[in-house]
Image: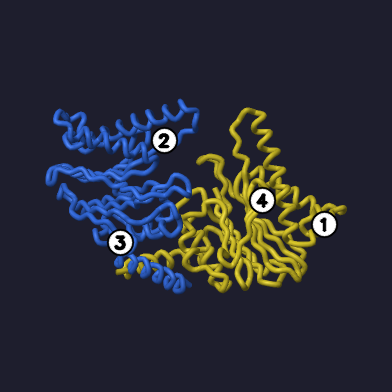
Chain colours: A blue, B yellow
Amino acid sequence: MTYCVGMLLDAGIVMLSDTRTNAGMDDVSTYRKMFIFEDPGERVLTIMTAGNLSVTQTVISRIEEAAEDPEATEKTSILLAPTLFQAIEIIGNVLSDVASDIAAKVRRMDQATNATASMIIGGQRRNGRMHLYRLYTEGNFIEATEDTPYLQIGEHKYGKPILDRVVTPKTSLEDARKAVLLSMDSTLRSNLSVGMPLDYVLMKKDDCKVTRQDRIEADDEAFKAMSDAWSQALRDSFAAVP
Amino acid sequence: MTYCVGMLLDAGIVMLSDTRTNAGMDDVSTYRKMFIFEDPGERVLTIMTAGNLSVTQTVISRIEEAAEDPEATEKTSILLAPTLFQAIEIIGNVLSDVASDIAAKVRRMDQATNATASMIIGGQRRNGRMHLYRLYTEGNFIEATEDTPYLQIGEHKYGKPILDRVVTPKTSLEDARKAVLLSMDSTLRSNLSVGMPLDYVLMKKDDCKVTRQDRIEADDEAFKAMSDAWSQALRDSFAAVP
């Protein structure tokens, strides 16, 4: 499975994804689920993917090819689209096309199809505002707002209680990083099909580029310390509640 | 939907259920999902139910009728079965029969069937040990053990992280009550189809009866205070993590 979470804050956008994929319990692999498209200072888009890997890889490849095509236009390249909204429409159309194609192929073989995928896309264009979208297989999408500043895809339930309690648009970027990592930590503990390493991206407001990017490996000392401190704090809180 | 959780501890069994049922978002009702069968001092069984309401109500009615039948035998009444294990087999057979019957009726009307249900059953018989079972629609079941001292049915994910961190067989009965209530609190916050009031039961080891039973209403001051204290403690813990 997968867990990806993105936050749209006053100060910027924070995104975190895991890297585990599985086709059955006995076929587990590591794949990057986070993809960055940027023209630094002009525009940035970070895409996180969940669902059928053949669908998501094909979508990302088509988007990359379209963006690198010397004859790319505003209608085909997400790096040329006049607004972020139009870039999302391009990605939505590609996702819908690819998912439909693969579903048709699977049906032709008389097999049950599960060729679905979803994405979280965050970014900003110079002189535009920041956006964070959640894209569905069918190509439609919703956007994070002040009332609901975060979006999740994949195995979202275990990591939601902490987000519901601490995240608002005013949350600082440091706290946002802590919140997504702790949300991921709860998910890693409870679902074996979500796994390390993790990919993290920060896009500060108006930077219009990736401000910070890192991969957190399974043996990361800081992550382990945070995870242990959180477990201990939870147990202490539990003891303190009357 | 539903959330029910039961714990098998060295000191006794603790069980908690919500009361919300819904047939679609616009058809929400309150139904008790916890049912007690006891011959105080001799044996006690507490059943919690999740799933299709027509299935669970029919199962409970059949079990009640069978137990009250003057001609009840060891093979038909869960209050006469020689062991708790055999009582669970009786309930499992009734559940499997009822679910199959209702599924057949639904299929006969050419409708898609979702006539499934599951149960958690905890109890003890005099001179026997305590047991906590999770029963599936098909009538088969699993049992809580020292390694996994709690069982959940229904909307189980939101309330699992807290249980994973604080519950062991050594957990005291006071802490167990706190743990199931906080686990329920997380679930209530994140899923509208789980709702107050709550039904709580404690069966102390070797009492072979219900030691404590209460209904926690929506305006319960103690529950609200606990919920607020937990939210505050979580936020404080979050702030304290490096």
Q: SS class of the residue under badge 1?
A: loop
Q: Which residue is mark 4?
A: B140
Q: Which residue is mark 2?
A: A115
Between disc 4 and disc 3, the foreground one is 4
> The disc numbered 2 marks a residue on which chain?
A
Q: How many numbered discs, if any?
A: 4
Q: Are marks 1 and 3 on the same chain?
A: no
Q: Earlier in the sequence, mark 4 or mark 1?
A: 1
> The disc numbered 4 marks a residue on which chain?
B
Tell me which amino acid carries mark 2: Ala
Tell me which amino acid carries mark 1: Glu
Tell me which amino acid carries mark 3: Lys
Question: Residue at position x 55%, y 72% from top?
Answer: B171
- Packing grade of label 3 (10 A; few <14, some 14-19, many >=20) is some
Identify whether B84 is placed above or below A52. below
Task: Pick whichever, B24 or B238, lies toward us.
Answer: B238
Residue A3 x, y percent position in the rendering: 38, 50
Q: SS class of the residue under badge 2?
A: loop
Residue A44 seen anywhere in this rendered image of the structure: yes
Residue B229 x, y percent position in the rendering: 43, 68
Q: Which mark is residue A178?
A: 3
Q: Which mark is residue B74?
A: 1
Between disc 4 and disc 1, the foreground one is 4
Q: SS class of the residue under badge 3?
A: helix
Task: Pick whichever, B71 or B199, lies toward us.
Answer: B71
Q: Quadrant of the C terminus of chain B?
A: bottom left
Q: Earlier in the sequence, mark 2 or mark 3?
A: 2
Q: Is residue A146 left or right of residue B28?
A: left
> The disc numbered 3 marks a residue on which chain?
A
